[in-house]
Image (spheres, rainbow, N blue to C red):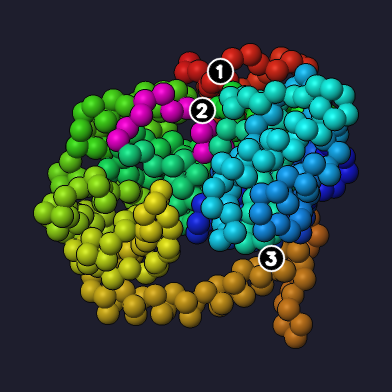
Amino acid sequence: MTDGSFEMIAKTLYGLEDVLAEELTALGAGNVQTGRRMVSFTGDKAMLYKANFHCRTALRILVPIARFRANNADTVYQEVKRIEWEKYLSPEKTFSVDAVIYSEDFHHSKFVAYRTKDAIADYFNERVGERPSVRLSNPDLCINIHISHKDCTLSIDSSGESLHKRGYRTAQGEAPLNEVLAAGMILKTGWRGESHFVDPMCGSGTLLIEATMIALNIAPGIYRKGFAFERWPDFDRDLFDEIYNDDSSEREFSFKCYGSDISPVTVQKAEKNIRSAGLTKYIELQTLPFQQFTEAPQPGILITNPPYGERITPDNISELYSMIGERLKHVFTGYSAWILSYKDECFDRIGLRPKHKIKLRNGDLECEYRCYELFAGTNKAYKKAEGERKKAAPRAIAEKQNRKEMASGNYPKGENKVKRPSGDYPKAENKWKRSSGSYPKGENKLKQPSGGYPKGENKVKRPSGSYPKGYRNISEP
C-alpha cells in the first residue's frame, strides 16, 4: 500500500497551513506545498507515521490513490469501481467512507459517500461473490473522497479519528478550544518554552497543556489509543515502535505555565486534564478572576481565548474587554499578549494597538488573533528603543562573527591581529552557545540532563516488539 516514496496530504484548520508546512519540513518531508486548509508533501512509510505522531497542527493525514473528474454521482461510482480494491481491502475487512464536497454539481455529501460504498461493494461482489462490510466506528480502512468543483480525489485516511483528539482530555469544559487550533496559536507566536506562559482565562486547560507539550517537545500522538494505519496490511510494527519510543528530541522546560479561571468547577476540569496528560509538575492553576491579577511572572508570554460569540452577551462584551486591556497595561508590562476573538468591537474595547493581526477560524466563527506588545513607558520611547535595537542588530551579528573567527585563529582580511598561540585558548570555551538553550548549527540537539525528568513522567515506553493495549497514558509518579 505504501512502498517507496508517495504523496500525502495533511489537512488542517484555516490559517494554520504555514505552521503545518514548517512542522512537516522539520520532520524531513519532501516537496512541501501549502493549499487551502491542507499541505501536500511526499515521503515514505516512516514519514507517514511521523506526520501522524508528531504534527501538532494536522487534523488527519491522507494518502491519495486516485484522481478523476466528475459532475455527478454516477460518474463517481464508475471511477471508484475502476480501482483495484484488493490492494487495500478484502471481503472479511470493514471500511467507511467520508465525503467532503465543495461543488455546485454535488449537493449531498452523504449521497456521494453512499455511491462510493456501492462501487466498492459491487467491485467485490462481481469478482469473489462477497463484499467487505461497512463499519462507521474503527473500520479496518477509512476512505476519504474530496470533491472541489469537478475535481475528485480519493484517498485512504491514515489517521482515523481526527488528530485533534489527543487523548488526554478527560473533563470537557464549555466550548473547549480545539487542540490543533490551540497548538497553532502557540506556534505562531514563536514561543517554544523560553519564558513563563500565562493563560488567565484557561477554561479546561487546552492552551496550558499544548504549551507545556511544546516546551518539552512531547509528541502530541503520545496519548492516543491508536491510528488507522495500524490496521493496514503492510503496517510495520517495529518501525512505528521505534518512532513511538524515540524521546531523543524531548527537552527540559525551566519555566512554568500558569493558568487561572473565574470558575472553580472549570479549574477542577483543567486539573483533571492536566493530570491525565502527566504535566502537573509544570503547570500551576488557581481560581482567580482576570481582574484580580496584580502581578505577572517575568519573563513571560500571555496567550488566551476569552469568551465571545454565544458564550457572552453583548452587554458584557464592553466590560470584559475593557478590563482585559486595563490588566494588560498595568500588570503584564514586558509581555507579548496574544488574544483570540472575533469582533472588532471586542478588540476595540481593549484600547491597545496590535502589532500583529492573524485571521483564524474557531469552529464556524471567523476570528482574529492579535498580538499586543506591552512595553513600559510611552509609545514614543518604545519606538525609539526599537529603532536603536534594529540598528544595533547587524553590528552585533558582525561582532559575533569576528569573535568566532578570532577564536579559531582566523581574522577578517586586512586586520593586523596577533594570533593566539595554538592550544592557548581553553578547549571548553571555544564554542559559542546561546543562553536560550538553542545551539549553533551542528549542535541543535538539546540533551536532557540526567535526572531531568522523574522516572515514569513524560515518557511512554512500550515493551519491545509489542503494542500497548488500551489507553496509552503518561501516569503521574
Identified at 70% across, 23% down, the residue is: 133
Magenta segment range?
Answer: 163-174
Identified at 24% across, 37% down, the residue is: 261
Reading the image, the residue beneath label 2 is 167
Identified at 76% across, 54% down, the residue is: 67
User: CA gap, disc 2 to disc 1?
Assistant: 8 Å
| Left or right, residue 91 beside residue 185 | right
The correct choice, above or below, for 398 with respect to 245 in the image is below
User: CA gap, disc 3 to disc 1?
Assistant: 50 Å
Instruction: Find residue 130 and report its image quarter.
Output: top right
Residue 471, label in figure: 1
Q: Does 267 lie within the magenta span?
A: no
Q: Amino acid at mark 1?
A: Tyr
Comparing 419 with 64, the one in front is: 64
Question: Which of disc 1 and disc 2 is earlier in sequence?
Answer: 2
Query: Mark 2 Cα within 10 Å, few/some/many (few <14, many 20+)?
Result: many
- Asked whether disc 3 touches disc 1, contact meaning CB atoms under 8 Å apart, the reply is no
Reading the image, the residue beneath label 3 is 404
- Asked whether disc 3 touches disc 2, contact meaning CB atoms under 8 Å apart, the reply is no
Question: In the orientation shown, which residue stands out farthest toward the bottom?
Answer: 414
Q: Amino acid at mark 3?
A: Lys
Quadrant occupied by the N terminus: top right
- Asked whether disc 2 touches disc 1, contact meaning CB atoms under 8 Å apart, the reply is yes
Identified at 65% across, 16% down, the residue is: 468
